[in-house]
Image (cartoon, rainbow, N blue to C red):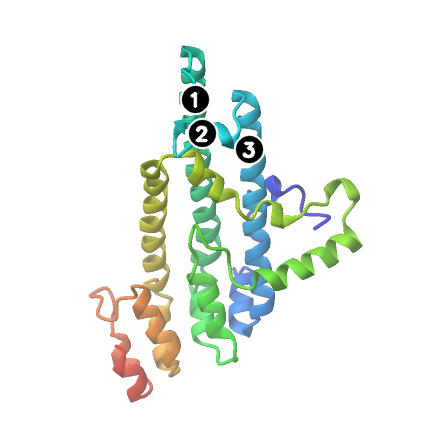
Amino acid sequence: MTNLGTPTDVIHQEWNVDNGGRNLFHLLCYKGNYECLIQVLNIERVYLKKTLFDQLYREKQRYRFKNMDIKHGELVSTVFHNADTVKRHEEFNIRVQALFEQYAHDLLARLRQALTLQDSPFHRNPIHYAAMSKFTKCFKCVEALLGFDLETDPEGYDEFLKLFFELQLLETSEERKFDPRKYRGILAEFKHLLSPKEYDAVLKDFRFSAKLLLKEVLDSQDANHHSPLHVASYFGDFKASRYMVKLGADPNSPAFAERPLEVGKDKFVRGVL
């Protein structure tokens, strides 16, 4: 927390990679270190939201608007608005929409960095690692990493918050301390300031792109031409296999040299394929 820099700095830093081409998500997924994983996911989201909050605050100051002045993309007042006010609102609305779009883009970019990196020489992403391990919480790591959404915080927020305050009290200088709870509801402000059509358009685009990202991750093949679904079915991980299929993993893709069904360990796994 003291060495990573400001929240804006952190969200633009790439994940560290070891000599085997693995980032921390490979290792956390393989070991089933769910508790550590949710801390990482939550601090990432908090830093993204704090950055977004600060950016929106500056735009409000620049265009001289408060939340009470606008509702769902329209100026709120029974008084006639002069041309200058209307023009300021039009420009402000464009900036707010751009900030929301950038937030959605940054969140997806961070998830892509985390999920698509392949190790060397096996070309396995973090979900491959979770699927080939039998530690108790590997499946929970898969759920935490793949169950993301724009409007929903990562799992374990309350546990994260407790640890965050403890570490901040011990390690962070006074001028750099902040309360994550202040920024948790920032998306509600965008929902208030933008019209439903504008807000929903960004949300729809994010979820479409997220679906494509999930499919890319789940259908990614390693050096043995095996996807994470192949690995989970080979090791008899029924829950992981079922979850991956639910998220869009294709058990019958023509790109596979052999189908996950053919390497399935038992009838329970084969039943979901």
- Quarter of the image with the C terminus in it: bottom left
Q: Which mark is residue 70?
A: 2
2 or 3: mark nearer the eye: 2
Residue type indicated by callout 2: Ile
Q: Are marks 2 and 1 in contact (CB under 8 Å)?
A: yes
In the rendered structure, the answer to whether residue 115 lies left or right of residue 41 reads left
Q: Secondary structure at mark 3?
A: helix
Q: CA distance from mark 3 to mark 1?
A: 17 Å
Q: Nearer the viewer, mark 2 or mark 1?
A: 2
Report, in whole angstroms, how far the alpha carbon at label 2 lies from the one at label 3. Answer: 18 Å
Q: Residue at x 73, y 42 (%)?
A: 176
Q: Do the residues under discs 3 and 1 have CB atoms within 8 angstroms?
A: no
Residue assigned mark 1: 89
Badge 2 density bin: few <14, some 14–19, many ≥20, Cα 10 Å = some
- Mark 2 near mark 3, Cβ–Cβ under 8 Å? no
Secondary element at tag 1: helix
Most distant residue in the bottom direction: 267
Locate residue 72: give its quadrant. top left
**Dot 3 amino acid type:** Gln
* Amino acid tagged 1: His
The residue at the far front in this view is: 78
Q: Position of residue 100 (x, y in %)?
A: 44, 38
